[in-house]
Amino acid sequence: MNKNIKWKLFSMLGSLRLSIFLLFGIAIVTMLGTIIEQDKTIEFYQLNYPVSTPIFGFISWKVILFFGLDHVYTNLIFYSLLVLFSCTLLICTFSKQLPMLKIARIWRFYRKKRQFHKLSSFIQFDRKAFPFFVFSLNSKGYFVFQKKQTVYGHKGLLGRVSPIIVHFSIICILFGSILSSVSGFVVQQIVPNGESFHIQNVLNAGSLSVMPQNILGKVKDFWIVYNSDGSINQFFSEIILENPYGKTVKKQTIYVNKPLRYKGLFIYQTDWNITGLKFLINNSPFQVSATPNTSKDNLHFWTVYLPNNSAFTQGSVFVISDLKGYVDIYSQDQKFITHQKIGEKFLLNGIHMQITEVITSTGLQIKADPGIPIIYLGFLLLMLSTLSSYLNYAQVWIFRDSQYSLIGGKSNRDIVKFEEDFHQIYQNLN
């Protein structure tokens, strides 16, 4: 491949037209991912997108599966569009934006009247000397350079950097998104209080994700803090992480919006559950599992059925609605018996018993998202570029010969403010 072909290919990849085309393609693919349900079963798509009645005349379940539209954001087409778009931004940055910035830093002195005529602001005045011109420009924040009878000043060079920062910020966001998609994972687990857990029960994982198996987690404790009106204020889990040798590497109490962080892993508090009750029946330990229920008012409670005889024909129902330390006891025919405090001994149907513990479980979401720091960096750069874009880049030239003096200038934005500064500079020269 000769140099001309390489240069044409390079220029094509860095063209604005291709960038707009790729951005339009990304928008279309994203729109399809929003319209078409993602990560469903084949039966779901066969039922909702039949071949006999395709959407828009061509979108059927066969088309969806063939082009990977059931997992738009993780298929090769979407990744290819993101990578190509990033390449166009990089090429544009290094081939156009950086050279333009370099040119903006060059001291360019004007010595001919026709050069001044091309400027948006231009004044010619009869004066052989113009004292204090450097001070006047410096007072306006200009960087001033003088060469014999010519002066050049500029300010707001940071405003010329903002397009470059925008390009790099978009590249960071795209690269971070791809990295998170291919190497991140989400695990959802319900762990009983006091039990250990490994990273398993994967909900979503990228094709290159690696889940660490050398970490053992343990829920040391779980508790709930209530408001004065009885509603839940917050629920907490004390998590311990151990290495394969049993040494504690991290210990932290987590709650909603306060995750545990360890070497790229994030453990979030998401839910909780009651799994059973522990009893002492005639001084013998006994454990019964709980059944979740929902009332007509959409209130959650758990029930435990404890038989009174070996034939299971009679028994009592224990109802737990919270973790405030009490359990309601009902007969088998739903008659209320007592409101019993946990830990106290009592007599039920001639049997000595004690509720020793409400067995709880905590819902944990374990995530690895390696692209998040890069995405955050991208958005930080984008905010900085937005702020810097408000800075106007202004240039002023002054030239003096034996007959007249010339002053001219231009600005890329905020023309009214520049005109005011320009006329003040001119007045100071007289």
Image (cartoon, helix red, strand yellow):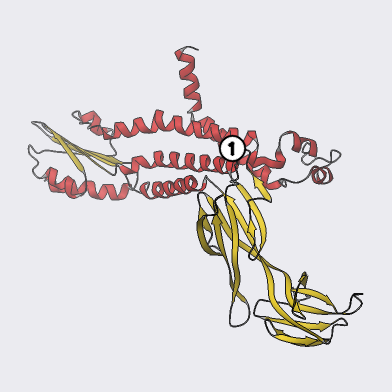
Q: Nearer the viewer, residue 395 or 429?
A: 395
Query: Residue at 90% across / 75% down in the picture?
Result: 312
Residue 222 image point, x, y percent: 60, 68
Residue named by callout 1: 24
Q: Residue furthest top?
A: 2
Q: Nearer the viewer, residue 78 or 407?
A: 78
| Label 1 packing within 10 angstroms: few (<14), some (14-19), many (20+) | few
Q: Nearer the viewer, residue 381 or 394?
A: 381
- Does residue 239 sit above or below 382 in this rendering? below
Label 1: which secondary element: helix
Quadrant assignment, res 227? bottom right
Q: Image check: 333 left or right of 173?
A: right
One can see residue 96 in this view: yes
Q: Nearer the viewer, residue 407 or 29?
A: 29
Residue 218 image point, x, y percent: 60, 60
Q: Amino acid at mark 1?
A: Phe
Residue 343 image point, x, y percent: 67, 82
- Does residue 379 sit above or below 94 in this rendering? below
